[in-house]
Every structure is written in structure tokens, then in C-alpha cells.
Image (cartoon, rainbow, N blue to C red):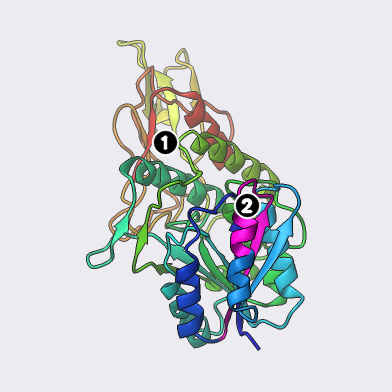
Amino acid sequence: MQRCTVVIPCYNEETRLDAQAFLSFVRAVPGVRFLFVNDGSTDGTLSHLERLCQKAPERFGVWDLAHNVGKAEAVRQGVIRVLRGDAEFFGYWDADLATPLCVIPQFLRTLEENPHFEMILGSRVRLLGRPIRRRPLRHYLGRLFAAAASIVLRLPVYDTQCGAKLFRATPRIGRLFESPFHTNWTFDVELLARFLQADSAAERESAVQALYEFPLPEWRDIAGSKVRPADFLKAALELLEIHRTYRRGLARLGRKGTGTFFGVGVATQRDDQSGRKMSQSPAACERSQDTSSPRRVIMDRDLPEVLDPCAQHLFRAVGDAVPLADAQGSVDSQRYVEHQVQADAVHVDLLDVVDAGKVLQELADSPNHALIR
């Protein structure tokens, strides 16, 4: 029995798929099988895959999709096919091998040594001695996206988009792939959102404890990537769709004491001398006796304890930065954030509690904004 099967989605990968790397891996590492899903490629990808499979048919398989359905659906259909077998572990991996195959045994070892882990996520953390080579633009756009994904998921995840993931073949994991994803570019985030749906805090905690981010020993951008900077706009829109679709299940954890809801507590009033909007804590706003100045109060609720283990700042509007986390990544969830916002900056002007979707929309609509780490 092959203990692990890895799905490799392929779309027009004829010139990028390194057949020799796959052959070398299966000769050196037993117990791992690969299922290549040809996602309606228009080049010679299918022929390339068939030639590879002929060299080790017991270790390689090809499933040909007649039409291009996108990476999310190609992965999902491949996983459904894998789950019909008896593999103990499964996963998916990018065909360009930006994450080298030699990491698979390390993922498997982590799952074997930690029976409570059900999902291993590759994480592209740049550390000394670990060559993580990413183009600067993609890196910084990726960090913006990661911060937004943390907000939506209410989870301190560092890297949702790395194309290297392994799973334990449990019923809970299998259910994640039963229905098509609503998204394509960001289906990894949607996968986590499905996994984190919970009816109780204990259920949520069980799901969180089953996740593990594995810092990759190596990762590199491969020429010919189909991801373009403009795709990050698509990803942002899909992130909003994930928020709308799964917010109820995730919101059950956004209550006091859980510290996993992103809400900014601000009260605004008009500065009588300058005429520009200033921010105050609600207590200060209540103390003000000037009833002629318009006020809007947003109650701070459930600021995140951890949005990123390394982050000290997450949200910044033109003006003063708001430190939401200290060096340990913890925040007092009862605290009100006092933040001076310039007239031309992002100004949260809502009558109710700010939720992640509204914050993201506010950021998307403003020319002066930044999410930083």
C-alpha cells in the first residue's frame, strides 16, 4: 500500500514539470504516490505526463480533465479520487516544485509523530539558513494578503497560499472536499474556513489544534508562474466572498474571551478649532459635554490576541500607526484603540461593530491605506 498520495494539478506545464525530479524522488522514497490531474491543458502536458507514468506506473497516475476547471476544482476532484483508495495521508503540491519534493517526508514525519495533527501547511518563512527566494513584489503583496486572511479566518496563520499541503485522511478532512469551492485563487483560505466552522469554542479549539504550519527549508519562485500582481485583486474579492459565506461559523469564535475577532474601537468627533475629524476613546467621547459636535461610537469588541506571531502592527491609516499586538503578539481585548485619522485617510465611520468584511471593503475603497507587518 502507498501510505500517501499527493495530487499534482497541472495546466500547461509541459515545459516546467521536472519529470526527472519526480522519478528521482520515487526511487529514493517509498510509500508515496503521485496523481497528476491534467486540467484541460492545451499544450503537450498530457503526453508528457503519460510518458512519465510509463516509467513507474505503480507510483504515478494521470487523470485527464477534458476542460479547464481551475486549480481549486482540479485539486478537489483529484482528492476525491484519492479518498476512494486506502491512503493514510494525502495532499497537494504545486507542479513547478517551488517547494521541493524532499519536504514531503518531513511533512509525513510530523503527521506520524503528532497524531492530533490533521493538516500540515507549508509556510514560507524567511529564516537564516532557509533559502526562501521570492520576488519582492510578490512577497509584500503576499504579506498583505496573509494579514487579511488572518482577519477573515480569525486565525494567526502566516501563509495560507503556499502550494504544499498534506492531510491525514480523516472523515473531518474528507468532508472539506465534498462540495465545490466558491473560490479559485484563494481556495486554500476557503479550505481553512470550512475546517474552522464550529458550533462551540471546544470544537473550534479542536480544529485549531489540528493545524500545523511547517516552516519550509527551501522555496523559490519558478519562472513561468501563472500568478500575476493583478491576480491579488481577484484574491481580495474572493476573500470577501469567503467572509460572506463562512462568517457565521467563524463568528461563533468572535466572542469575548476568544480574542479572535478583528474589531477597531474608535469614537470620532469634530475638532472645533481645526474642523477635522479626530478620534477619541469612547470614554473620552462620553465625557465631552459638547453636544453640538457630531459623534459616532464604535464599541471595541474582541480584538485578536494573535493575528501573526511576528506582527507588532497590523492596521495603519494615514496618521499614527495603531499597535494591535506587542512583541509576543498579544492584545488586551477590552482595550479601546485611540487613533488619529486624517481627513483623506481610511476612516471607519460606522454605527455598529466593525467586522472583518467591512474593514477589508474600507481598505479596498481608499487610496490611502496599508496593512503592514
Residue drawn 58% across and 29% down? Answer: 351
Front-most of residues 334 and 78: 78
* Residue 26 position within the rendered picture, expressed as x and y whole percent measured from the top left: 51, 80
* Residue 100 position within the rendered picture, expressed as x and y whole percent measured from the top left: 42, 67
Residue receiving disc 1: 283
33 in magenta: yes
Front-most of residues 17 and 303: 17
Q: Secondary structure at mark 2?
A: helix
Q: Amino acid at mark 2?
A: Lys
Residue receiving disc 2: 71
Range covered by the magenta-colored residues? 31-49
Residue 244, visible in the rendered structure: yes
- In this rendering, the answer to whether 365 lies above or below 216 is above
Q: Amino acid at mark 1?
A: Ala
Q: Few, some or many C-alpha atoms within 10 Å of disc 2 (few <14, some 14-19, many ≥20)?
A: many
* Residue 122 position within the rendered picture, expressed as x and y whole percent measured from the top left: 45, 65
Residues at marks 1 and 2, CA–CA distance in whole angstroms:
50 Å
Q: Secondary structure at mark 1?
A: helix
* Residue 367 position within the rendered picture, expressed as x and y whole percent measured from the top left: 42, 22
